[in-house]
Image (cartoon, helix red, strand yellow):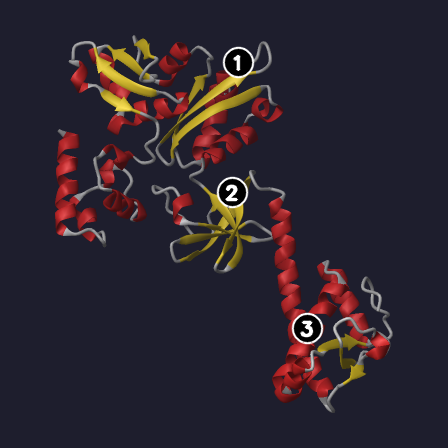
Amino acid sequence: MDTQTLTARTEFAAAINQICSERGIAPETVLNAINGALVASFKKDYPEQALKFEEDELVITADVDSENGQFRLFVGKEDAKKKDLKEITPPGFGRIAAQAAKQVILQTIREAERDSVLADYQEHIGEVMTGMVQRMDGRNVVIDLGRGQAVMPPEEQVHTEFYRLNSRLSVYLKEISETIKGKQIIVSRADDRLLSGLFQREVPEVNSGAVVIRAIAREPGSRSKVAVESTQAGVDPVGSCVGQKGVRVQAVINDLNNEKIDIIQYAEDKDKFIKSALAPADGLNISFDTRSGETTVTVPSDQLSLAIGRGGQNVKLAAKLTGSKLRIVSETASPETAIVATGAEEYEIDQLDLETKARNILVEAGLTHIEDLTEDKLDSVKGIGPKTLEKIKVQLASYKS
């Protein structure tokens, strides 16, 4: 039998050819699936015969005659040639075979279409795409990407965003992951690379490579810092990303639901880079401790709150952006009161001295910001006992004092 195109002498062969042509499926894929289903149907309906063949080390095979469309079953040794096989097709098996073939064809079409869609999106992993919120599946958001559906799990969502049905949004195509429901396209709104992709889409200089994004530090939904550098003389990297009257960066901000974005000139000079990263604070004095790897930033007392930022956000993002362990010290305060940020904190609540279990429960509940930890919200979180709850409240009081 020709595995590429069946001889269209029967309605069955013509139908198979048409389906395969329309769906982009190889006829061999459908026929192999049908043959497997026919063997399974025989074993189910004639278990005693099937068991005897197995005991005799004989293999049951199925075949579809391309000339007359008949289903036939054979038995023989595993490596036997077709002429040495014995036909064992039971009387009336055609009706059973037809039903099995129908189910297999439908299932094969669905699987082949899904595999085709996944293969198509596999080539676009790492890109930013626009999709529409189709439905909620538990805590997952299902996104319609056009040809296929993607899933945005809780850890890839932005906790400040509310995903309304039929709303359009940009997502980062992160991976195709094997789950209990099979392979799924995973997209993200929280990944740093979404921000990079949006700038590539909005800024021609970034898309062409004239401006390069060197580093990103992001607290999704709240604020981001982006370090950019020019690879061509005469190109202003910050100005290119901001755009005339801020139109380019505003387009990215709008796409991220008003997430604040600081665009910073990248510099090889660590001193200069750290000072830029800690903007809008000014008048900073930088000193490096090569033994501890810590960078001490001495700040004028009137600039201290700007350098640290609300909830330590500014210094945390600056530490992550520059890859430095920053120690913020006021000119008028003692060294013991210094604020230290490593850039390794994943969430704002990581600034509290929380037990790992309690911290993970809060993250799972979406309470990742200090301001989220109100008494009402904490009381409603499942899995946190009274003693742990009291410890969290003590940590909050200490942090805010």
For the residues carrying marks 1 and 3, which lies nearer the camera in this image?
A: 3
Q: CA distance from mark 3 to mark 2?
A: 36 Å
Q: Is residue 165 visible?
A: no
Q: Nearer the viewer, residue 72 or 300?
A: 72
Q: Which mark is residue 36?
A: 3
Return the residue at label 2. 174
- Report, in whole angstroms, how far the alpha carbon at label 2 lies from the one at label 1: 31 Å
Mark 1 or mark 3, which has the lower sequence index?
Answer: 3
Relative vertical location of residue 13 with respect to residue 400 in this rendering, above or below = below
Q: Are marks 2 and 1 in contact (CB under 8 Å)?
A: no
| Above-or-below relation of 252 to 188 | above
Please tell me which residue lies in front, 252 or 216.
216
SS at circle 3: helix
Mark 1 nearby-residue class (10 Å; few <14, some 14–19, many ≥20): some
Residue 118 x/y as whole percent: 60, 52
Q: Which element type, helix, strand or loop, lies under badge 1?
A: loop
Task: Pinpoint residue 390: horizontal percent, then vertical percent.
Answer: 12, 44
Residue 65 seen in the figure? yes
The residue under the point 49% across, 34% down is 193
Along the viewing direction, whichever of 382 and 237 lies nearer the viewer:
382
Quadrant position of the N terminus in the picture: bottom right
* Residue that carries the numbered disc 1 in the rendered image: 236
Instruction: Give whichever of 108, 371 is nearer the camera.
Output: 108
Quadrant containing the C terminus is top left
In this picture, residue 260 sits left or right of residue 70: left
Query: Which is more N-terminal, label 1 or label 2?
Result: 2
Indicate the amino acid at tag 2. Answer: Lys
Q: For this view, does 314 lie left or right of residue 358?
A: right
Q: Is residue 396 above or below residue 61?
A: above
